[in-house]
Image (cartoon, rainbow, N blue to C red):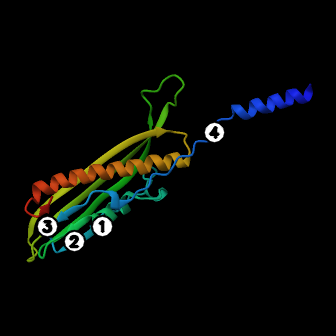
Amino acid sequence: MYLKNKIIFIFIFLFSCQPLEILNPVDIDISKLEKISINVNKIEIISNYNPIFSEENIEDQIQNSPFDIIFKWNENNISKLGSENKLVISILDSSILKKEIDNVNAKRYEEKTIFQYKINFFVEYQLYDDNNFLVANTTVESTRTTTSQKYISLSETEVIINDLLINAMKDFISEAKSQLSVYMSGYYII
């Protein structure tokens, strides 16, 4: 009888266990993002961004920083197709912030505070002729936010941040294409 109860207890215990959910990491592959072609001979990328390390700024805590992603995209996905002119790309902001905010829509048993993640991209594009005169310029700015629960695993946090980075880059690319087609229409190749 004791052995039978023990077996039943073990059987119930084993079937009541929940399987562990394993999240696949979101891969950030710059080559899969859209490309832009501009009629220039030379592209120069300048970093004018100085991160302010504070409690809210988490750039140093994540694997793929927004600066690295925006720099690599500008370096690899903007094609030069001309024999004259120079495009100067100045990265002015590429920050990611994590704030603890009140959950105003919280239901009875939900957490009262949540985390808000915010990514800012701010890049200036300047087109110069061969005599170093400014021909055209535009600035592209993109901001995206998302929220998460306060107590989640590190892998869930990484998935949320990488998904936010990909979506912010897609927003930035869309805005860049729009701005470049308006302000550099004679040089931007669709």
Q: Quadrant of the N terminus?
A: top right
Instruction: Give the distance between the C-alpha atoms of the residues marked 1 and 4, in whole angstroms.
Output: 41 Å
> Which one is nearer the viewer's eye here, 112 or 81?
81
Sequence order check: which comes first, mark 2 or mark 3? 2
Relative to 29, residue 3 above or below: above
Q: Position of residue 89 (x, y in %)?
A: 23, 65
Query: Label for residue 127?
Result: 3
Instruction: Give the distance between the C-alpha atoms of the residues marked 1 and 3, in whole angstroms.
Output: 18 Å
> Which one is nearer the viewer's eye here, 127 or 30?
30
Query: Does residue 33 appear in this view?
Result: yes
Sequence order check: which comes first, mark 1 or mark 3? 1
Q: Quadrant of the C terminus?
A: bottom left
Instruction: Give the distance between the C-alpha atoms of the residues marked 2 and 4, in whole angstroms.
Output: 51 Å
Asked whether, in this view, residue 168 is left or right of residue 90, the answer is: right
Closer to the observer: label 1 or label 2?
1
Relative to 58, residue 14 above or below: above
Task: Identify the element where label 1 is drawn.
Answer: helix
Q: Amino acid at mark 2?
A: Ile
Asked whether, in this view, residue 179 is left or right of residue 73, the answer is: left
User: Which residue lies under the disc numbered 4?
Assistant: 19
Report which quarter residue 32 is drawn in: bottom left
Closer to the observer: label 1 or label 4?
4
Sequence order check: which comes first, mark 2 or mark 4? 4
Q: Position of residue 172 (x, y in %)?
A: 27, 52
Instruction: Give the distance between the C-alpha atoms of the residues marked 1 and 2, in whole angstroms.
Output: 11 Å
Sequence order check: which comes first, mark 3 or mark 4? 4
Q: Amino acid at mark 3?
A: Leu
Badge 2 vs badge 3, beta-carbon distance below 8 Å:
no
User: Which residue lies under the disc numbered 2?
Assistant: 43
